[in-house]
Amino acid sequence: MPGAIYAEGLVKTFGDVKALDGVDLDVPEGTVLGLLGPNGAGKTTTVRVLTTLLQPDSGRATVAGIDVLKHPNEVRRAIGLSGQFAAVDEYLTGRENLQMVGQLYQMKAKEAKARAGELLDKFNLADAADRPAKTYSGGMRRRLDLAAALVVSPPVMFMDEPTTGLDPRNRQQLWEVIQELVAGGTTLLLTTQYLEEADHLAHDICVVDHGRVIERGTADQLKARTGGERVEVVVHQHEEIEPARAVLAGFGKGEVAVAEHTRKLTVPVTGGAKLLAEVIRELDNRGVEIDDIGLRRPTLDDVFISLTGHVAEQKEEEEAEKEEAK
Ligand SMILES: Nc1ncnc2c1ncn2[C@@H]1O[C@H](COP(=O)(O)OP(=O)(O)OP(=O)(O)O)[C@@H](O)[C@H]1O
Ligand SMILES: [Mg+2]
């Protein structure tokens, strides 16, 4: 049986841009799917198709068992959506915004009022509740938008970059709200640029790029596929990046990633602590002074860079070949 969110072969083109190039998804009920991908990968487009805001060119999808293309109105009743850009009414207060949503969903006035009060507390908006939303800061608007998506507790929720622009404390609180929701049986599709967030919240992860799912699995599975540990070195001076890169390239099992600004170099390795000692000796032999060095397990960031970096390289190669063919 297909899951609470199911998509098969979604294609959507805008002019020359293939925003979706055959997206397949299957999210079991009561779980969280994290949709990751670089800017322009097709995440928002996927969410828009699944929430009936956009018609795909081809493919099919069901949400809560309802066909998205055939019965969009029924789908809308079964879902909650928090978009990448906040959709609050500027002139209404925070409280009025939330009450209005409740009334749109046919809640009784008293019930809508109680729910609004509860959410204003939960999202730290109680103090600003009776000010027009146009006086809110960016993070406050975002929280109001999220609260609006939670006025009714829909069986299926979509959140497009829910925590972008939130400070760490508010992000942490939203994570708790999300975990409560999911514990209560809600199915959630979440897009995020914070891989730590996907690691923390998502049962399964799909990495999308160029409108396609290029990898899927649990966070642990993806990390395991990226392979081995990482040696991470911070060199003392900018000039030492190049010699350090050469040393790491000699020991590494993959490409050396360099963050110029922080003078940090990272390379996948096998061989553990013994290898680390050898790396330190070799850096010392070459006169590279280090501020920090360590061995760590791969993070989702490593997964993301290795996957999407790889795709970009392939594209570059293809383009270089095309140039040569001319
Ligand atoms: N209405 C539109 N008209 C034209 N092109 C569009 C439209 N919507 C999306 N696109 C294009 O489709 C591609 C996918 O866009 P989408 O918004 O789905 O990306 P995204 O993964 O959400 O990116 P981001 O991380 O920046 O939010 C992009 O190349 C974008 O420019
Ligand atoms: Mg987007």
Image (cartoon, rainbow, N blue to C red):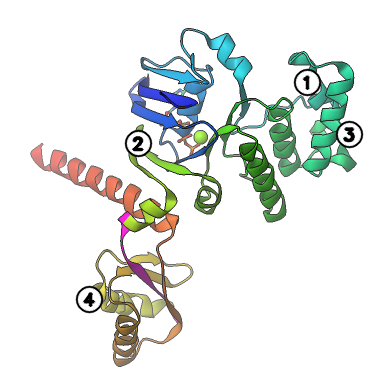
What is the spatial separation of the Cα atoms under label 3 and label 1, in whole angstroms? Answer: 19 Å
The mark nearer the N terminus, 1 or 2, is 1
Q: Which residues are magenta?
A: 225-237
Name the residue that disc number 2 marks: 213
Q: Residues within 10 Å of mark 4 (few under 14, many from 20)?
A: few
Answer with the quarter of the image where residue 140 lies. top right
Residue 120 lies, with reference to residue 71, above or below; the image says: below
> Tags 3 and 4 in contact by the CB under 8 Å rule?
no
Q: Secondary structure at mark 4?
A: helix
Bin the neighbour count of mark 2 within 10 Å (Cα to Cα): few under 14, some 14-19, many 20 and up: many
Residue ID at (45%, 42%): 204
The answer to which image quadrant residue 130 occupies is: top right
Q: What element does badge 2 sit on?
A: strand
Residue 36 percent across, percent down from the top left: 45, 42
Q: Is residue 203 left or right of residue 105?
A: left
- Residue extending farthest front: 1
Query: Is residue 246 in the magenta section?
Result: no
Closer to the chain start, of discs 2 and 3, is 3
The mark nearer the N terminus, 3 or 4, is 3
Residue under numbered circle 4: 250
Q: Dot 3 corresponds to which residue?
A: 131
Q: Amino acid at mark 1?
A: Gly
